[in-house]
Image: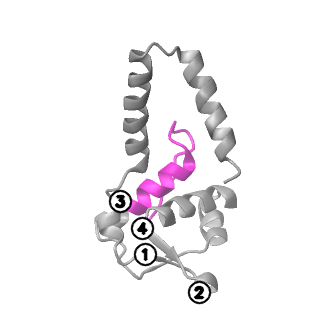
């Protein structure tokens, strides 16, 4: 599997990394149980910041595309192929769109929605 990052792209680097790993799983280029490079190694190979690769790995683990086994390393999840099609960002966008539409129908202004959204986020950031 070869990963190519386009630093000129409008797509964030971590998103490019997530997409390419998911595509490699979907195409069968990497199989369940296959090891992935460590965060540090992949960051060095791609000339990226460790934190960028770590963010991509966290998102892939959240989506059950990869699994981290402590000091043994990071591996492709047994159900990775099925989990590659899950798009939490699309789901969140759809849910927010529906909720915001109902607020607007009730007469809530954009400003009121933004303030309430920020308040809720700030309240839940310590959870």
| Circle 3 crowding by C-alpha within 10 Å: few under 14, some 14–19, many from 20 | some
Name above or below for residue 88 compared with residue 122: below
- Is the C terminus in the top left, top right, bottom left or bottom right quadrant? bottom right
Mark 2 = which residue? 72
Tag in front: 3 or 1? 1
Please, what secondary structure does the residue beneath circle 3 have?
Answer: helix
Give residue 99's position: percent from left, percent from top.
41, 30
Mark 1 = which residue? 76
Q: Are marks 4 and 1 in contact (CB under 8 Å)?
A: yes
Q: Which of the numbered marks, if any, corresponds to residue 23?
A: 3
Q: Magenta residues, as a range?
A: 1-22
Q: Earlier in the sequence, mark 3 or mark 2?
A: 3
Which of 41/51 is in front? Answer: 51
Answer left or right for 55 relative to 108.
Answer: right
Q: Are marks 3 and 2 in contact (CB under 8 Å)?
A: no
Name the residue located 59 percent from the left edge and 67 percent from the top edge. Answer: 42
Q: Earlier in the sequence, mark 3 or mark 1?
A: 3
State the residue lying farthest toward the bottom.
72
Answer left or right for 55 relative to 35.
Answer: right
Name above or below for residue 48 compared with residue 89: below
Name the residue located 55 percent from the left edge and 23 percent from the top edge. Answer: 113
């Amino acid at each position: 599997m070869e990963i190519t990052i386009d630093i000129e792209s409008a797509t964030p680097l971590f998103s490019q990394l997530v997409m390419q790993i998911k595509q490699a799983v979907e195409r069968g280029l990497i199989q369940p149980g296959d090891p992935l490079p460590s965060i540090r190694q992949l960051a060095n190979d791609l000339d990226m910041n460790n934190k960028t690769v770590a963010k991509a790995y966290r998102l892939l683990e959240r989506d059950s595309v990869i699994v981290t086994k402590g000091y043994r390393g990071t591996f492709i999840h047994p159900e990775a192929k099925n989990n590659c099609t899950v798009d939490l960002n699309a789901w969140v966008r759809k849910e927010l769109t529906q909720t915001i539409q109902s607020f607007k129908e009730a007469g809530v202004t954009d400003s009121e929605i933004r303030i309430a959204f920020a308040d809720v986020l700030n309240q839940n950031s310590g959870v």
